[in-house]
Image (cartoon, rainbow, N blue to C red):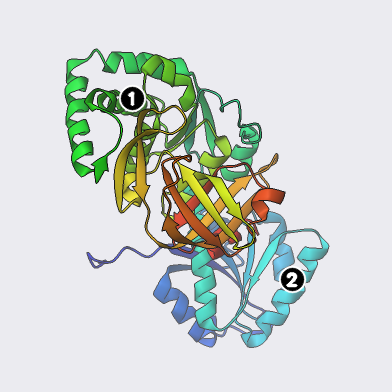
């Protein structure tokens, strides 16, 4: 029985290739150090080359364990029926590395993607952990529904997504939703006494939790909360796991902005992005699946190539990402309700997926040096020192919005693209 304080181990599947030349020796014993490390980290399911159909019905990361030399023909026999990514696992014992490299050379010659895992046992376990996490992330992404409520804002001329490619590459389904549905739902909320009472209670909690308030009155906060309730209802109706909103398109009708609503949806665990930016919400969803973290979507405001620093800002931030927040108005319109979040100092990862074919990405470690307080930028803003050249933003940017994640996730996110 699993300890109540320990999560159950994830499973991996090993398909053993073993030559008749080594007899029927117990390969788990011969490769004891590697196997003990893997069994400590995972629930390991073992199969031999005669059990190809069984292993391909198993869930979890599947690896081809090259246990000895002389296994190249065994691999060629199973290759036409193999449906999983090809990962060749070996520790070098019994000429297993030599056989793995011969197989890898054949795969390369035939333009087949593959990976060889070989190192000391501790590093092998680390590498398999990483691949297993990516496997789980891709599994989690498959079938997620991302709502596009209204079209991308007119100025986002490079931030759309080919929905067919998004499904092929990431397993994500983009769902188009008319902005009018939100407006109609909002109107219902503002004429429903029960919903108005709920909005009033949430507005009080919001004001009590704030460090202080600069702009906005009680009525403006209640309208912003009603928009949150309306968006939450629309997301529920369409079974969404994430959404991006053409937020400027609702201001005239609702007399409020979407900043608070989107911030609270993120806090609820439903990833929400601004301005109908499809590439940024895709990046947020992928990043959350891989790292478990919610990101801060922001746009560049100041860049210094001399110091390799950048100020990134936005009016919408998940309150749970902040140390505290101030109640503000939306910067561009000077209306509605936005958050000026005070962000934690420390190591972050800046990430973006994009390009016409969703085949481009930017990824760097950075340090959040200080929260800034410029009066002519979006409300939540901070200065970062990047590890990669900041000139990227000026010479080859992938749109303007980028995603900030607290922590160092460069290694695992980079592996997504290999």
63 or 329, which is in the foreground? Answer: 329
- Location of the N terminus by quadrant is bottom left
Query: Which residue is at a point 51% across and 48% down the rendered structure image?
Result: 312
Residue 406 sits above or below residue 39 on the image: above
- Which quadrant would residue 155 be assigned to in this image? top right
In this figure, which residue is indicated by the disc labeled 2?
103
Secondary structure of the residue carrying tag 2 is helix
Question: Which tag is nearer the camera, tag 1 or tag 2?
Answer: 1
Spot occupied by residue 183 in the image (x, y as percentages of width and height): 39, 16
Compared across the picture, whether 382 is left or right of 206 comes to right
User: Which comes before the other along the chain, label 1 or label 2?
Assistant: 2
> Relative to residue 101, is residue 77 depicted above or below?
above
Nearest the eye: 157 or 39 = 157
Query: Whole-percent x and y of residue 133?
Result: 48, 60
Identify the residue shown where x is 68% and y is 42%. 355
- The x and y percentages for residue 323 are 30, 54
């Amino acid at each position: 029985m699993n300890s109540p304080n320990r999560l159950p181990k994830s499973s991996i599947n090993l398909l053993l290739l073993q030559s008749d030349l080594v007899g029927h020796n117990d390969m788990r014993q011969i490769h004891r150090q590697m196997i003990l490390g893997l069994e400590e980290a995972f629930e390991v399911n073992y199969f031999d080359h005669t059990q190809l159909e069984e292993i391909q019905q198993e869930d979890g990361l599947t690896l081809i364990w090259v246990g000895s030399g002389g296994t190249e023909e065994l691999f060629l026999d199973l290759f036409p029926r193999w449906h999983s990514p090809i990962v060749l696992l070996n520790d070098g014992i019994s000429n297993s590395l030599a056989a793995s490299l011969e197989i890898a050379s054949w795969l390369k010659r035939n333009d087949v993607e593959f990976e060889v895992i070989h190192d000391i046992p501790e590093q092998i376990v680390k590498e398999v952990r990483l691949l297993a996490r990516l496997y789980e992330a891709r599994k989690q992404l498959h079938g997620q529904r991302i709502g596009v409520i209204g079209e991308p804002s007119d100025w986002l001329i490079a931030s759309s997504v080919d929905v067919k490619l998004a499904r092929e590459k990431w397993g994500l389904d983009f769902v188009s939703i008319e902005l009018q549905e939100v407006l109609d739902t909002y109107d219902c909320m503002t004429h429903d006494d029960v919903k108005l009472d709920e909005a009033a209670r949430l507005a009080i909690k919001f004001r009590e939790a704030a460090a202080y308030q600069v702009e906005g009155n009680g009525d403006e906060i209640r309208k912003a909360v009603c928009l949150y309730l309306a968006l939450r209802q629309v997301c529920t109706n369409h079974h969404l796991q994430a959404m991006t909103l053409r937020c400027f398109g609702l201001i005239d009708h609702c007399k409020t902005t979407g900043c608070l609503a989107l911030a609270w949806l993120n806090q609820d665990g439903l990833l929400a992005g601004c301005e109908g930016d499809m590439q940024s919400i895709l990046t947020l969803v992928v990043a959350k699946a891989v790292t478990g973290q919610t990101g801060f979507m922001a746009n560049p405001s100041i860049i210094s190539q001399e110091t390799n620093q950048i100020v990134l800002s936005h009016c919408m931030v998940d309150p749970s990402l902040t140390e505290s927040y101030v109640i503000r108005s939306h910067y561009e319109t000077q209306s509605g309700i936005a958050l000026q979040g005070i962000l934690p100092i420390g190591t972050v990862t800046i990430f973006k997926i994009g390009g016409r074919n969703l085949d481009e990405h930017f990824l760097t470690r950075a340090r959040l040096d200080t929260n800034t307080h410029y009066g002519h930028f979006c409300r939540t803003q901070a200065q970062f020192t990047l590890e990669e050249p900041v000139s990227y933003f000026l010479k080859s940017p992938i749109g303007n919005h980028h995603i900030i994640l607290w922590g160092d996730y460069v290694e695992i996110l980079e592996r997504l693209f290999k």
